[in-house]
Image (cartoon, rainbow, N blue to C red):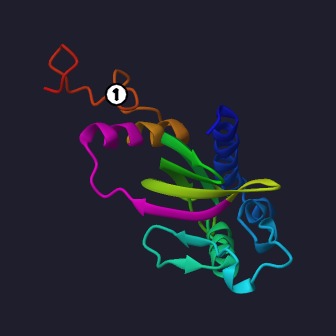
């Protein structure tokens, strides 16, 4: 594994999330592995060909397999999400040969459609999801082979406060107490430890 590989995988991973934020379905489609991305020898037995099926698990969804199912799911999500922004944390990248794995926490801020009688964005909702993204090296760069995302169900008070602060900053209301910034619950005993 080289630093160049790690940087290229990081770029591919960030491009995946940025395409979703922009609602760019064509870009998103190009980031997923396709059968033409993997070359085969002319004399190779088709039964020995590598499986290039892509897989995706969205939080609360069943496993989706194949380009049709996976890309259709993103088309549905994009059509029903007015606004989405990902704040990636805890990003870890591992590259072995032509396969790379990225684990990260997706701190998601999203908004639904505007109310019928308004042009304003619908209410903003925050969610924390842990994700594993598996990439394969192709002649056109690193392509997404599998995405698995699961909701984080249990959070510590500090994590909840940090997410609340992120949402407050994003919607312009700011923290409820000026002394409390994102991730600062304000409950300390003076030495920085929780009271």
Residue at image point 78% right, 78% down: 44
The answer to which image quadrant residue 134 occupies is bottom right
- Observer-nearest of 115 and 102: 102
* Residue 160 among those drawn in magenta: yes
Please indicate, yes or no, whether residue 123 appears anywhere in the rendered image. no
Residue at image point 75% right, 70% down: 34
Q: Position of residue 9 (x, y in %)?
A: 66, 45
- Observer-nearest of 145 and 97: 97
- Quarter of the image where the N terminus is located: top right
From the image, tell me which residue sits under label 1: 177
Please indicate, yes or no, whether residue 67 appears anywhere in the rendered image. yes
Q: Position of residue 36 (x, y in %)?
A: 82, 71
Q: Position of residue 3 (x, y in %)?
A: 65, 32
Q: Position of residue 125 (x, y in %)?
A: 47, 55
- Observer-nearest of 58 and 50: 50
Q: Is residue 58 above or below residue 72?
A: above
Q: Is residue 193 left or right of residue 149?
A: left
* Residue 93 among those drawn in magenta: no
Considering every residue shown, the one lying at the far top of the view is 191
Residue at image point 63% right, 72% down: 54
Could you tell me how many numbered marks the image carries? Answer: 1
Q: Is residue 177 above or below residue 15?
A: above
What is the crowding at mark 1: few (fewer than 14 residues within 10 Å), some, or many (at least 20)? few
- Quarter of the image where the C terminus is located: top left
The answer to which image quadrant residue 120 occupies is bottom right
Q: Is residue 155 left or right of residue 82?
A: left
Considering every residue shown, the one lying at the far right of the view is 42
Q: Is residue 163 left or right of residue 118?
A: left
- Observer-nearest of 101 and 72: 101
SS at circle 1: loop
Q: Is residue 76 above or below residue 94?
A: below
Q: Which residues are magenta?
A: 144-163
């Amino acid at each position: 594994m080289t630093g160049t590989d790690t940087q290229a995988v990081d770029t591919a991973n960030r491009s995946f999330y940025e395409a979703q934020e922009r609602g760019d379905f064509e870009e998103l489609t190009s980031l997923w592995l396709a059968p033409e991305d993997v070359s085969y020898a002319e004399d190779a037995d088709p039964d020995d060909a590598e499986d290039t099926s892509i897989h995706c698990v969205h939080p609360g969804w069943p496993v989706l397999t194949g380009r049709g199912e996976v890309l259709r799911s993103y088309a549905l999500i994009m059509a029903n999400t007015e606004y989405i922004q990902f704040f990636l944390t805890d990003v870890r990248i591992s590259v072995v040969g032509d396969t790379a794995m990225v684990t990260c926490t997706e701190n998601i801020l999203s908004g639904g459609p505007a109310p019928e009688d308004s042009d304003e964005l619908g209410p903003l909702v925050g969610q924390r999801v842990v994700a594993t993204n598996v990439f394969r090296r192709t002649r056109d760069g690193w392509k997404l082979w599998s995405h698995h995302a699961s909701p984080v169900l249990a959070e510590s008070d500090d994590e909840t406060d940090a997410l609340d602060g992120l949402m407050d900053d994003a919607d312009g209301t700011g923290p409820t107490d000026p002394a409390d910034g994102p991730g600062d619950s304000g409950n300390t005993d003076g030495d920085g430890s929780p009271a």
